[in-house]
């Protein structure tokens, strides 16, 4: 029996980076969380502690900041630039993964006019990307995280098995709410990233609001399908939808009725509905999701 080193990777996780773009007095904010993860010929450092092939994670952090000096642009392009740099500049690095989450800031209205340099964090979901580069090609994922949505009606849930542990009442009218995490895979490493994101986001929202739902699973499939129908460059969508339960409060102890107006918004436990919707001719995903 011999003991060997298995799969490994390392990097600087969650580099929080804010860039101010200054167009005269008018500023724009880019607020990112950037995680770098590198893998390659790392036996020496694990087996003997020799670090000559280890690009320090501190250097990776500095690179994340230095590459923001001349502008960030679309996060997919920024992640591609960084991933390619780490692999091409270091012989020992074979694969780089760069994941970026972008926090949206909305310009404030001050004195009835759009402010030049004042913003509020907005809640329309965080745009995400994960780029994997292996020295030959790059795989690009896009996505959105923490996009909280709610339909106050237009949702039923019934017809599920009733057995000895079932207590849930069937319903023909309920609140349906979730915090959407969606990740989509692009067929290639070039696309109009901004347009793809805007269209995918609008499609997710339109499908959520426009689907009369008999289950969150049905809504998930509708949302994934709509993205694939509207963004030709996307070949696969993975969705993770926590069912944010809103339970009708029993007001009868107080002699009150409750015609679908007062709810308890429970935070735990929650149903977690997850699924993948993809084109049946989608090219292989390679290491994109690893
Ligand atoms: O949309 C739903 N899907 C389920 O699988 C489920 N299970 C449950 O208890 N409530 C719901 N709602």
Image (cartoon, helix red, strand yellow):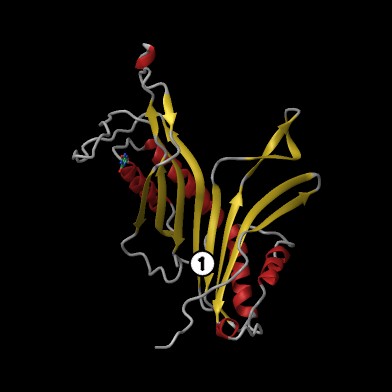
Residue 23 locus on image (x, y percent): 77, 49
Q: Residue at x 33, y 33 (%)?
A: 155
Q: Residue furthest bottom?
A: 1
Q: Quadrant of residue 110?
A: top right
Image: 14 above or below 172: below
The N terminus lies in which quarter of the figure? bottom left
The C terminus lies in which quarter of the figure? bottom left
Q: Which residue is mark 1?
A: 189
Residue 104 locus on image (x, y percent): 62, 46
Residue 281 locus on image (x, y percent): 33, 64
The front one of 148 and 167 is: 167
Residue 33 locus on image (x, y percent): 62, 56
Disc 1 residue crowd, few under 14, some 14–19, many 20+, Cα 10 Å: some
Image: 35 above or below 275: below
Q: Is residue 192 visible?
A: no
The front one of 172 and 13 is: 13
Q: Residue at x 72, y 67 (%)?
A: 62
Q: Quadrant of residue 185?
A: bottom left
Q: Secondary structure at mark 1?
A: loop
**Where ligand 1 lies, by quadrant?**
top left
């Amino acid at each position: 029996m011999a003991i060997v080193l298995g799969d490994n990777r390392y990097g600087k996780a969650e580099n929080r980076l804010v860039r101010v773009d200054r167009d005269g007095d008018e500023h724009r904010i880019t607020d990112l969380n950037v995680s770098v993860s590198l893998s390659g010929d790392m036996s020496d450092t694990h087996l003997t502690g020799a670090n000559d092939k280890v690009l320090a994670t501190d250097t990776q952090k500095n690179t994340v900041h230095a590459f923001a000096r001349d502008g960030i642009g679309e996060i997919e392009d920024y992640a591609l630039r960084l991933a390619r740099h780490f692999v091409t500049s270091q012989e020992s690095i074979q694969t780089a993964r760069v994941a970026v989450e972008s926090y949206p800031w909305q310009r404030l209205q001050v004195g009835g006019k759009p402010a030049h340099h004042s913003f509020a964090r907005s809640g329309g979901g965080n745009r995400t990307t994960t780029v994997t580069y292996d020295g030959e090609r790059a795989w690009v994922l896009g996505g959105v995280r923490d996009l909280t949505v709610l339909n106050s009606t237009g949702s039923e849930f019934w017809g599920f098995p009733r057995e000895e542990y079932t207590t849930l009442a069937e319903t023909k009218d309920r609140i349906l709410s979730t915090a959407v995490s969606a990740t989509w895979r692009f067929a290639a490493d070039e696309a109009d990233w901004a347009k793809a994101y805007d269209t995918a986001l609008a499609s997710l929202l339109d499908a959520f609001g426009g689907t009369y739902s008999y289950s969150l699973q049905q809504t998930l499939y509708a949302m994934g399908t709509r993205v694939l129908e509207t963004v030709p460059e996307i070949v696969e969508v993975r969705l993770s939808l926590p069912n944010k339960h809103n339970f009708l409060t029993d007001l009868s102890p107080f002699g009150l009725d409750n015609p679908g107006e007062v709810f308890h918004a429970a935070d735990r436990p929650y149903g977690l509905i997850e699924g993948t919707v993809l084109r049946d001719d989608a090219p292989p995903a390679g290491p994109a999701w690893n």
